[in-house]
């Protein structure tokens, strides 16, 4: 028994046997479908990004800064965060990109960032993806504007790469563009916006295009194409995505080569060798950055990166393929927020309802798909999608086996493989679209119909199972998550996703079962169904992308606060640090302020040194040790000798942290006094100067409003104002003194002081003493800190024992044992002019010296020294393995000092010391990169010379745009069915066959 179904026709760009091209209108749908896909791509790009393209807003989530002081109580007071989970972009990626862009526009190429974590590489390694082709906007545009154009370039590369690859494997223009639209709207490409990850992922389609060209021809130009794509991906700065793509591409090349050359090992081996040569050449092109990167990464602290088989995307996340916000939103203004166990960017797996329907159609139409695509392409795409799906969503033994391999799976989260998975689904979706819009009637067996029905049924059953799993998760209490709103969010989002699925199924069914030979109205309806599919893809993508992309005011882009201005004028060559809520990664680096904190890979010895500070400075496993930040705002006085050694001269505390010092608390006599708005109350301070803060004790029901301010003016007996400050009611609590920090430490000892207390924009009930408020105070103490800045947003303390960042050490202590060395450095037993060395070196004679700054640049530091005897010049930066030093122009040894710092031995006399960042293996990398470029150009030039026609030989025929179309079947044809013969169709009916 036979049944009539639709099968693909010859693609428009292919040549039928005999070289005769058939009339265009008989082989494809009108160009209105292609135009519809182009419009869908353009709409997604320009509407999705929106106002950041013309400078009306910025794609940087600066609203996140509103969570830390000083911004939260000053310029960004009342500003809300728009998208959660983008912290890395705000405290690491954007500040470094801004720093680099400013340097380039000033005529420099900054290789080193000296402002965070003792110094880290900037443009010398691919960590920040600054040399990626799609990162070029940061070279020319301000950092608040550049991300929008980086995103636009990513869309162009992703769509263009898919178009080139899909056209290469015989898909039409509309389907090829639609595949690009599906890929560029997939979860990984959207979620990792403003990270280097997407700058790598968008080149995955281009890589497969280059590989497919290599399948057809083994020529130097194809090897060069592979090399250029690999280089672009490596320059992008996230090697795990490159590794996943190359692994998949290697299997694809193997399968395609074996399929095109069955039983012939030489062509297969030649293509494999050419592909390997392309990858090696790509690494060679990037050697100028790759070798310094490898050298630096061998010196950093790497921990918390080991992976286990249970670290994968939970299977219920498959719901997000059609319902991206099924487990919560990314916008705090639209609760409930993402409530799954991992962060949104690591779990969401969106591809789109219409794309999923098209991809399933491609799988269900197995025979048609195999005919449509080049040999083994359909089988590979289906198998690779299933394989990656199992590894990413189920984990288990397959993932455990892969994690035994070095680096790629053992040290990197498999969630990032969604980049490749999104591309594979996009290819299947494009193939499914092509199968639907180009078809012919042909008989088929019940087995094929049963297979197709089984595919759709299996997907339906799997969908129900996944929904039930997601429902259980939404109903299960977890932490503070409990309530019906979570299940409601899940059901609402899934319902919307299913609505898009239903519309897509209607369109697909109409394209498949509709009669292309019917009257004009039916044909127009069929064209309408084809144009509706890309519209559905774009509309659903915009529904989740528009709320996800941040659009913040350009004025809120890392604004210069009063704290920044104070530090800029007082910090000098030293660095600052602070409690949590006052330091956030490396955000101050954008203003050229040197901080001990930061967010980057940190040099191992330097990390071990700062970990001796009280509290937890670096995250513990399973989190990677790449964020240097204090763990709590409740630590005591920052008096660690290690802070002195690393030249932390200023320390920041949030306003809700009571001032350091000796507290004198007056809880009152049981009476209550109400402080009314703008009514000043004058009371004596219970202790004489110098002091660090004055406070009152709220009573009754107290809630912070973030509007009410308490101001204090401090006066001496003559009435002269000696200090004044105010503070928002942030952190106010009943029964606890509410202090306003005051910079009144220069008041002469024993000076009687009075405080004028005023409440603004609100009233406050406080504990009283008699007819006045009970006043508490914090007196100064000899604790090594001095309150120097009493702004309402941050309190700044000067650390009076901090050493200079470049200092003279007249004496040396040798301690070879690392643990004892760290204990000695944190003990406080060392004198200021002593340095601790790992091994004995040049003698230090104990004589003093004068050190004068000459230059404090980004990748060069120079000082002059007038030494009365031999000693060491110590620099408190993390430069041990990466910098070099000269003394009077002569190369000298840079020795480890104070465990994580560096020093150079200097003889007596006047000398100029120059420290400079020297990229490890940079010269070798530059030579390798240059040689690779020369080799590729020579090979391509030699090939062109060989192909140049002579005067006696005819010109070779031009190479076809696409590989020759493979005949459908060698079996003899039967006469056309009477039901088909003579009917008009959109395809070449001469190629149709009727099979039992």
Image (cartoon, helix red, strand yellow):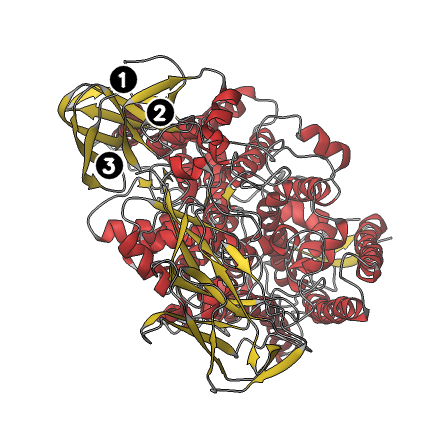
Above or below: residue 282 compared with residue 722: above
The residue carrying mark 2 is 835
* SS assignment at label 3: strand
Between residues 621 and 163, which one lies in front from this camera angle?
621
In the structure shown, which secondary structural element does the residue marked by tag 1 occupy? Answer: loop
Q: Is residue 409 above or below residue 104?
A: above
Q: Are marks 3 and 1 in contact (CB under 8 Å)?
A: no
Q: Nearer the viewer, residue 472 or 634?
A: 634
**Apparent side of residue 948 relative to residue 961 in the rendered image (left or right):** left
**Residue located at (41% from left, 69% from top):** 753
Nearest to N terminus: mark 2 or mark 1: 2
Q: Which residue is mark 3?
A: 860
Residue 434 visible, this orientation: yes
Residue 46, given in percent of the width and then of the height, sits at 45, 69
Vertical side of 647 occupied by 350: above or below? below
Looking at the image, is mark 3 or mark 1 nearer the viewer?
A: 1
Residue 67: percent from left, percent from top:
52, 63
Estimate how packed mark 3 is, as few (under 14), some (14 to 19) or many (20 or more) residues with alpha carbons within 10 Å.
some
Residue furthest right as drawn: 1
Looking at the image, the residue that sits furthest to the left is: 910
| Mark sitting earlier along the chain (3/2) | 2
Q: Where 687 sits versus 880, above or below? A: below
Tell me the residue at 35%/61% (across/down): 747
The answer to which of 467 and 976 lies nearer the viewer is: 467
Residue corresponding to mark 1: 844
Q: Is residue 633 left or right of residue 896?
A: right
The picture quadrant where one finds residue 317 is bottom right
Find residue 678 and report its horizontal and vertical position in percent: 47, 86
Front-lying residue, 613 or 232: 613
Label 2: which secondary element: strand
């Amino acid at each position: 028994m036979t049944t009539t179904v639709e099968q693909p026709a010859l693609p428009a760009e292919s040549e039928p046997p005999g070289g005769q091209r058939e009339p265009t209108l008989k082989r494809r749908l009108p160009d209105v479908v292609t135009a519809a896909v182009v419009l869908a791509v353009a709409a997604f790009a320009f509407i999705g990004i929106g106002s950041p393209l013309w400078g009306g807003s910025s794609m940087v989530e600066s609203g996140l800064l509103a969570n830390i002081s000083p911004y939260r109580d000053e310029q960004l007071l009342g500003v809300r965060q728009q998208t959660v989970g983008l912290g890395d972009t705000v405290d690491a990626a954007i500040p470094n990109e801004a720093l680099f862009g400013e340097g380039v526009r000033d005529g420099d190429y900054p290789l080193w960032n000296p402002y965070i974590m003792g110094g880290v590489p900037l443009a010398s390694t691919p960590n920040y993806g600054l040399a990626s082709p799609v990162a070029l906007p940061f070279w020319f545009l301000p950092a608040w504007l550049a991300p929008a154009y980086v995103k636009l370039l990513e869309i162009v590369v992703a769509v263009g790469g898919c178009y080139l690859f899909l056209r290469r494997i015989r898909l039409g223009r509309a389907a090829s563009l639609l595949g690009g639209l599906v890929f560029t709207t997939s979860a990984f490409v959207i979620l990792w916006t403003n990270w280097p990850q997407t700058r790598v992922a968008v080149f995955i389609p281009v890589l497969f295009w280059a590989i497919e060209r290599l399948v057809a021809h083994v020529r130097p130009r194809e090897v060069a194409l592979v090399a250029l794509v690999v280089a672009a991906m490596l320059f992008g700065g996230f090697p795990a995505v490159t590794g996943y793509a190359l692994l998949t591409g290697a299997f694809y090349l193997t399968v395609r080569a074996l399929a095109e050359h069955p039983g012939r090992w030489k062509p297969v081996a030649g293509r494999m060798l050419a592909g390997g040569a392309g990858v090696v050449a790509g690494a060679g092109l990037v050697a100028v950055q790759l070798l310094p990167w490898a050298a630096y990464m061998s010196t950093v602290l790497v921990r918390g990166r080991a992976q286990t088989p249970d670290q994968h995307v939970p299977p219920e996340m498959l719901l997000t393929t059609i319902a991206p916000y099924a487990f919560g939103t990314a916008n705090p203004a639209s609760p409930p927020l993402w409530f799954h166990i991992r962060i949104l960017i690591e779990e969401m797996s969106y591809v789109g309802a219409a794309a999923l329907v098209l991809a399933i159609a491609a799988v269900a139409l197995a025979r048609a798909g195999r005919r449509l695509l080049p040999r083994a392409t359909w089988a590979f795409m289906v198998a690779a999608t299933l394989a990656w799906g199992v590894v990413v969503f189920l984990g288990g033994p397959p993932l455990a086996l892969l994690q035994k391999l070095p680096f790629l799976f053992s040290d990197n989260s498999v969630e990032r493989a969604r980049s490749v998975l999104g591309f594979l689904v996009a290819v299947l979706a494009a193939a499914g679209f092509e199968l639907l819009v180009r078809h012919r009637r042909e008989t088929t067996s019940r087995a094929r119909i049963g297979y197709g029905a089984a595919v759709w049924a299996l997907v339906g059953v799997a969908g129900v199972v996944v929904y039930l799993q997601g429902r259980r998760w939404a109903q299960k209490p977890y932490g503070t998550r409990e309530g019906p709103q979570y299940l409601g969010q899940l059901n609402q989002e899934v319902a919307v996703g299913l609505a898009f699925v239903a519309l897509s199924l209607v369109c697909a069914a109409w394209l498949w079962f509709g009669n292309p030979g019917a009257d004009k109205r039916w044909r127009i309806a069929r064209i309408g169904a084809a144009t509706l599919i890309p519209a559905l893809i774009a509309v659903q993508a915009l529904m989740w992308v528009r709320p996800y992309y941040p659009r913040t005011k350009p004025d809120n882009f890392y604004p210069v606060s009063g704290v920044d201005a104070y530090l800029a004028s007082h910090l000098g060559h030293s660095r600052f640090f602070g409690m949590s809520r006052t330091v956030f990664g490396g955000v101050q680096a954008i203003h050229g302020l040197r901080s001990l904190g930061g967010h980057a890979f940190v040099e191992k010895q330097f990390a071990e040194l700062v970990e001796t500070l009280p509290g937890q400075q670096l995250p513990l496993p399973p989190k990677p040790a790449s964020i240097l930040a204090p763990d709590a705002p409740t630590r005591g006085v920052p008096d660690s000798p290690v802070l002195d050694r690393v030249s932390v001269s200023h320390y920041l505390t949030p306003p809700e942290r009571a001032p350091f010092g000796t507290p004198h608390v007056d809880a009152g006599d049981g009476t209550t006094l109400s402080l009314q708005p703008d009514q000043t109350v004058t009371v004596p301070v219970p202790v004489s100067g110098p002091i660090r803060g004055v406070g009152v004790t709220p009573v009754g029901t107290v809630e912070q409003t973030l509007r009410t301010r308490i101001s204090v003016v401090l006066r001496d007996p003559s009435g002269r104002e000696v200090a004044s400050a105010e503070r928002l009611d942030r952190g106010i609590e009943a029964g606890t003194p509410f202090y306003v920090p005051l910079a009144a430490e220069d008041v002469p000892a024993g000076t009687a002081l009075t405080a004028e207390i005023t409440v603004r924009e609100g009233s406050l009930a406080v504990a009283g003493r008699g007819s006045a408020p009970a006043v508490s105070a914090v007196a100064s103490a000899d604790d090594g800190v001095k309150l120097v800045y009493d702004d309402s947003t941050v309190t700044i303390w000067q650390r009076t024992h901090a050493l200079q960042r470049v200092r003279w050490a007249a004496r040396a202590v040798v301690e070879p044992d690392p643990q004892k060395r760290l204990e000695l450095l944190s003990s406080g037993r060392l004198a200021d002019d002593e340095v601790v060395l790992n091994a004995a070196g040049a003698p230090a004679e104990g004589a003093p010296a004068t050190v004068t700054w000459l230059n404090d640049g980004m990748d060069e530091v120079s000082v002059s020294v007038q030494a009365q005897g031999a000693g060491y010049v110590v620099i408190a930066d993390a430069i041990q393995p990466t910098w070099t030093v000269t003394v009077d122009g002569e190369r000298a040894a840079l020795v480890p000092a104070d465990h994580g710092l560096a020093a150079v031995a200097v003889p007596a006399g006047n000398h100029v010391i120059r420290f400079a960042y020297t990229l490890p293996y940079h010269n070798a990398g530059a030579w390798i990169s240059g040689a690779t470029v020369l080799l590729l150009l020579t090979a391509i030039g030699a090939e062109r010379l060989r192909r140049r026609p002579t005067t006696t030989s005819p010109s070779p025929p031009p190479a076809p745009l696409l590989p020759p179309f493979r005949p459908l079947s060698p079996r003899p044809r039967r006469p056309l069915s009477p039901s088909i013969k003579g009917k008009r169709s959109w395809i070449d009916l001469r190629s149709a066959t009727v099979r039992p």
